[in-house]
Image (cartoon, grey):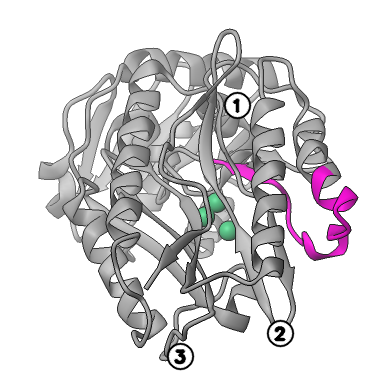
Amino acid sequence: MTSPRFDYASRLARARAAMEERGVDALLLSVGPDLPYLTGYEAMPLERLTMFAVTAEDAVLVVPQLEAPRVEPGPFETRPWGELEDPVRLVAGIVGGARSVLIGDHTWATFVLSLQEALPEARFGPAGELMASLRVRKEPAEVDLLRQAAQAADRVLARLAEVDMAARTEREVARLVAEWTVEEGHDVDTFKIVAAGPNAASPHHEPTDRVIERGDVVIVDFGGRLGGYCSDTTRTFVVGDPTPEQEEVHAVVLAAQRAAAQAVRPGAIPAEIDAAARRVIGEAGYGEYFIHRTGHGIGLEVHEHPYIIETNSQPVEPGMAFSIEPGIYLPGRFGVRIEDIVVVTDDGVEILNDSDRSLVQIG
Ligand code: ZN
Ligand code: ZN
Ligand code: ZN
């Protein structure tokens, strides 16, 4: 991963302020995106413990000795541990008499259990909420990486619009998408959904050996990672001429997608953004076929806060980035989804994707 360097000292200062606000004595982060957010270092998901231990006084990255050379210096101490040492005891020694401990959501249960045994006085909770409160508003440099990733995804879609998908399998198209995701500038491809014909009625369909036929609607939803930041975009294609019903369903989803994107501005309530999309689809008579939330936050993870869902009433703020991806899924027949990534700006919204949203005819 090409990992750009951010201002880790100020991120650490914000983490400590959030700890103090919540009365937290120690923050323990291991595998997952919270650790690189604060240190620039991503832990290998292996049986040897990597753990960043933060207290009001100390910030120590406990890391297996053989992985320590990968750590770039930052505003923390690095403590490599050798094969014969006990890293859990090391971490317990650093956080000492901590009473309130927050531990990273992705930490392996085996380490959580050992740490709980080593710190019998401490109360453990998940660090997810505190870390999300830091990560949810993106810095300009993070928005820039999200924008680059979105533009790379757009270039993949433009190339895909030139492909005759008929007679290829979903899996073959998925392989092309993965290859082009990297060719167009991502460091890695993270996922690809290619769902043709009736399979397009399943939102998270896994590509199969089904041969794509004329008349199929094909949903392509994919993403990669660029400089650590994710893309996630969906377009819907049709092989040959669309039926009037396919055209109508696509037009409804496009109108819903536009309505939701236009509802985004500082202070907008996620529930209302969701409702803007749901209203359009409901009024067209397809309400029961829009079976998921309108969107999810995106950043170091492809799904993170804020979630654009009926139950979220926390107003969005400048710097928040999320997807707008309404869909209609007609079981056994076909489906349509259109997805863009948007960022809340100081006075409105920036839509990071710019590729053709129409029902593009291929083949
Ligand atoms: Zn999804
Ligand atoms: Zn997606
Ligand atoms: Zn998405």
Q: Position of residue 157 (x, y in %)?
A: 35, 54
Find residue 145 and report its image quarter. top left
Which residue is depicted at the point 10% across and 43% down? 69
| Point 26% across, 46% down: residue | 63
Visible residue check, residue 196: yes
| Residue that numbered label 3 is attached to | 210
Q: Residues within 10 Å of mark 3 (few under 14, many from 20)?
A: some
Q: Disc 1 to disc 2, how far (Cα)?
A: 41 Å
Residue 143 horizontal/vertical position (percent): 40, 25
Q: Earlier in the sequence, mark 3 or mark 1?
A: 1
Q: Residue furthest left?
A: 69
Task: List the residue tagged with mark 1.
Answer: 133
Q: Quadrant of residue 166?
A: bottom left
Horizontal relation, residue 78 to residue 170: left or right: left
Confirm if mark 3 falls within 8 A of ligand 1. no
Q: Is residue 124 visible?
A: no
In front of the other: label 1 or label 2?
2
Residue drawn at x 65%, y 67% is 246
Between 57 and 144, the residue placed more toward the observer is 144
Q: Earlier in the sequence, mark 1 or mark 2?
A: 1
- Labelled pair 3, 1 in contact (Cβ < 8 Å): no
Stretch of the chain drawn in magenta: 280-297
* Amino acid of disc 3: Arg
Calculate the distance from the C-alpha at mark 3 to the C-alpha at mark 1.
43 Å
In percent of width and height, residue 149 lies at 33, 40
Quadrant location of ligand 1?
bottom right
Circles 1 and 2: CB atoms closer than 8 Å: no
Q: Earlier in the sequence, mark 2 or mark 3?
A: 3
Q: Mark 2 belongs to which amino acid?
A: Gly
Q: Which residue is mark 2?
A: 332
